[in-house]
Amino acid sequence: MNDACDVAVVGAGPAGLVAAIEAARAGLSVTVVDEFPWPGGRLLGQLYTDPRSHGRWDGRKISRQLAQEAGELGVRILGGATVWAVGRDLSLELSGVPVGTLRPQALLLATGAAERALPVPGWTKPGVVCVGAAQTFTNVHHVAIGRRVLVAGIDPLALSVAMEMHHAGVDVAGVVLPPVSTTSGALASPERAVARLADVADLAPNGLLRAAARLAAGKLSPLAVSALRFDLVRVGGVSIGFRTALVAVEGDGRVESATLRSVAPDGTLVGPERRIEVDAVCISAGLYPLTDLAEIAGCPMVEVEELGGLVPLHGPGLETPLERLFVAGNLTGIEGAKVAIAQGRQAGCSIARSLGRATLVSPEDAARAVSDARTSSPFRFQPRIAAGRAAMAELWQQAIARGDQSA
Amino acid sequence: MNDVIICRCEGVRLSEIEQAIREGASAVPGVKKRTRAGMGPCQGRVCQRVVLQLLQQPPSEAGESPDALQRSRSPVRPTLLGDL
């Protein structure tokens, strides 16, 4: 079955839903598709107190409201729909729903991000999960990933999920550094972990992260960490091992224990191995933009490390060099949900204008809202995100100068 | 550490990938052709970045063309033959 619409949106997360709402407000017919059965994307697992607004950020509630608003505006949301190809004419091939091919006038890719893997001996055993999956299990499905869980990764997301699991009654055996190996590079240095935490000290949305971050900003400043004598810091009932790294996961058919070793401030392993009994290990290695659909659509890709790696080349209004192809959310760089919402609004307006519709929000206001959201975000996933955005603006200008832009 | 699995879809181990790099693979597609890393159901979504890190010492400059990665192809997800 073929299907035509003005706008197709891939990804029903915060960016995709808000863009769909904005485009529908401008009078366009919009279809949103998502692999997951329910709309919301990563919002579904988010629940924290925002220290700026002193309010609760209940992602599930926000996604319900956005989906309802979209529905009232006539947006069609197709859950459980897998997009397996994008044509050069921006047509989408779908699987899992009766609609076979979607033929939109304009396409927004808001595919989000995927988790980076961090191989360590034993990482393929049942019981080892990525931190985002642990968050989904805990907050969306209300399933404990184990009775006693080790978290490997001392970063804002890992500490938040550790706290969420702790609150849900899971015995969090500790939070330690990710494995030190050829494949983790600088991830596993105590100095780096502490510097990264100090960066979020003012904005941290939960007690554990806030306490760890304050500690990092004060007592454990990047300079002081080289003289760090103590290893374990206990915050809110969870132990953080700033000088301990995961080196292997063992078990017969499933996770039964994890092997740890001490780490020198520069990231080299020192001292003997020790083993702790756990039945689940949660590994956090960061996120990267999920670019496959942008690539097969033919969008030029550029590597910008500060944005999380390979990202589609895009302009200040979230347009790409391909006519009527737009991008928003984590696909353009790893940031929090507030930025994704603001980007969704901006992309929705850009799409409406590209199809000759007037919008209530001016391009300048939409762009300003994105930078405001960035400033007030309680999470900063990429420490140098502003530099990454500036680099992208520069690359876009170069592309225009070369005449790459078709619009 | 040398026998840690890197590509879990195809069961390719670190030592095999290092061997491929020694044999002259300079980008992800070269490693893929020699070892099948990234050719399973996830199409490299899990292992490709790890393979790239193994290849890149030091990492590439910002804005550099991303030829080092394998190209995404449709179908980008496991798809029923009936839907093709």
Image: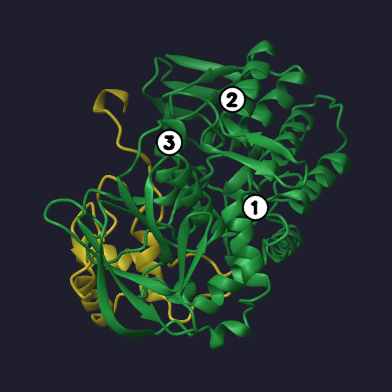
Q: Colour of chain B?
A: yellow
Q: Which residue is mark 2?
A: A104
Q: Are marks 1 and 2 on the same chain?
A: yes
Quick one: label 2, few (<14), some, or many (20+) residues within 10 Å?
many
Q: Identity of the amino acid at label 1? A: Phe
Circle number at residue A307 = none
Viewed as shown, does residue A358 lie left or right of A87?
A: right
- The image position of residue A333, as x and y in percent, is 61, 53
Q: Secondary structure at mark 3?
A: strand
In the image, B20 versus A226, the foreground residue is A226
| Residues under numbered marks 1 and 2 in contact, where contact means CB atoms less than 8 Å apart | no
Q: Identity of the amino acid at label 3? A: Ala
- The image position of residue A75, as x and y in percent, is 63, 17
Q: Quadrant of the N terminus of chain B?
A: bottom left
Q: Identity of the amino acid at label 2? A: Pro
Circle number at residue A85 = 3
* Residue A334 appears in the figure: no
Q: Secondary structure at mark 2?
A: strand
- The image position of residue A398, as x and y in percent, is 73, 64
A60 shown above or below A151: above
A77 shown above or below A318: above
Residue found at x 73% / y 59%: A202
Q: Earlier in the sequence, mark 3 or mark 1?
A: 3
Viewed as shown, does residue A275 lie left or right of A98?
A: left
Q: Which residue is mark 1?
A: A379
Quick one: label 1, few (<14), some, or many (20+) residues within 10 Å?
many
Q: Earlier in the sequence, mark 2 or mark 3?
A: 3
Q: Secondary structure at mark 1?
A: loop
